[in-house]
Image: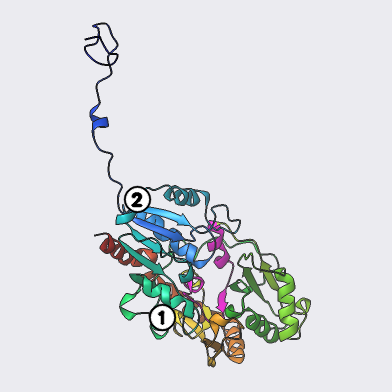
Amino acid sequence: MPNTPGLGKQPANAPQDPPASEDAARPAPALPAGIVFEGPAFGPVGQACEASAQLLTLARVGVPVCLVPTDSPDDSGSPLGSATRQQLESLTHTKLDLARSVLYRATVPPDWSLDYYGRCRIGRAGFWTDRIPRSWVEPCNAMDEVWVPSEFQRQAFVDSGVQAQKLRVLRAGVDTTFFCPGQPPLAIPERRSFNFLSVSNLRDRQGTELLLTAFAQEFHPDEDVSLTLKIVPSRQRSMDPGSELAFFLERSAGVALENCAPLILLEEWPSASGRASLYAAADAFVLPAHGVASGRTLLEALASELPVIATGWGGPLEFLNDSIGYLIDLEGLVPVPYGEEFLAGHRWANPSPAHLRQCLREVFAHPEEARKRGRQGRQTVVENWDCRALFPRWESEFRRLLA
């Protein structure tokens, strides 16, 4: 039989194929199961601050995490340091077995993808009125579980039609070794001896117009007091913040910006270390919000040992009371004054302008009592709301889902 190329015996001097290695013979290792996290992680918003801390801690304790960010690592408003940003970016390259992994969504419920299903689907959400939008109910009920930041939120979701058995309360804390007294204060030009601080994105719900009006009407320009307003970056802003605040004042208080005790605007978001220094440059924190989802800035201020003036309603009442802060009285709950259909029927708190002015004056006039409450506030947060104290519950829940 003629010799057919590729068949029969090879000549003795023919090159030999290398032997198959043991590694090549083995099947590729299986990808691990883990947490596929979709949501903001890099920016200055509260959700991103919560997410970045949890993601890095989960990774440190050995829970595989794949980050699918809905914001950009290059966000100019990001408060993260470069090392933290790089650590988070590295999590975007994690490879997981999607079919065996937990799909965790931390965006607004209408954006939760329901086209994919892993081991289970978890949503994280919170809202700032007495209920949630109707468009949230269906996606919430399509998830296996929905994690909310407070008992107040849990009840609002149930009252809106979300199945009670799907809801779990998982509270988010703050790093009390980072937000703590003794940090070097941020240099703030025009700051006076007593400086109030507020953080706002200038939306109505944070009560910024109410605060500016109360401050302008309560304090004379010659008094040794100032208000620093840290503006959270927003791509939706159509007017520069200075013009917007001047408009607020002239419309609500009938006062020109230049005729007030100093109102200091900080538009550039501080660096990671600068966030703690921002609180260190203040003597009190004030947030007369109509509604908040979680109250992260209130916790940061309390951890920094600042006396806090805040609206006496909603989720923050889980950690804030009159022994550690100053709760602004309500003039009831009122309809949300927006025209958007998704807020039809919603109500939020109506903080008392007169009582807000009274609280501002009391803190300014009695700084020793205010500092005493600030010290008690920090102790409360250290004992009950430090992220290291709360994280074991998060880790336990994630490991339960992966078991």
The answer to which quarter of the image holds residue 289 is bottom right
Q: Secondary structure at mark 2?
A: loop
Query: In percent of the image, x 27 and y 41: which residue is there?
Result: 29
Residue 277, visible in the rendered structure:
yes
Q: Which mark is residue 96?
A: 2
Residue 190 occupies quadrant: bottom right
| Pointer 1 residue | 157
Is 215 within the magenta?
no
Q: Quadrant of the C terminus?
A: bottom left
Closer to us: 151 or 180: 151
Q: Is residue 155 left or right of residue 119?
A: right
The answer to which of 303 and 403 lies nearer the viewer is 403
**Residue 245 position within the rendered picture, expressed as x and y whole percent measured from the top left:** 71, 75
First in residue order: circle 2 vs circle 1: 2
Identify the secondary structure beneath mark 1.
helix
Mark 2–mark 1 distance (CA, rounded to whole Å): 32 Å
Give the residue displayed 64% in from the left and 71% down from the top: 228
Q: Are discs 2 and 1 less than 8 Å apart at CB? A: no
- For this rendering, which residue is in front, 306 or 238? 238
User: Residue 181: x percent and y percent?
Assistant: 49, 66
The answer to whether residue 290 of the structure is visible from this angle is no
The amino acid on which the numbered mark 2 sits, given as a three-letter code, is Leu
Q: Quadrant of the N terminus?
A: top left
Give the residues in magenta: 272-299
Q: Quadrant of residue 149?
A: bottom left
Q: Tell me which residue sits at (27%, 31%) in the image.
A: 24
Report x, y in % for residue 171. 38, 72
- What residue is at 28 percent from the left and 16 percent from the top? 6
In the displayed structure, 389 sits above or below 256; it is above
**Left or right of 73 in this view: 396:** left
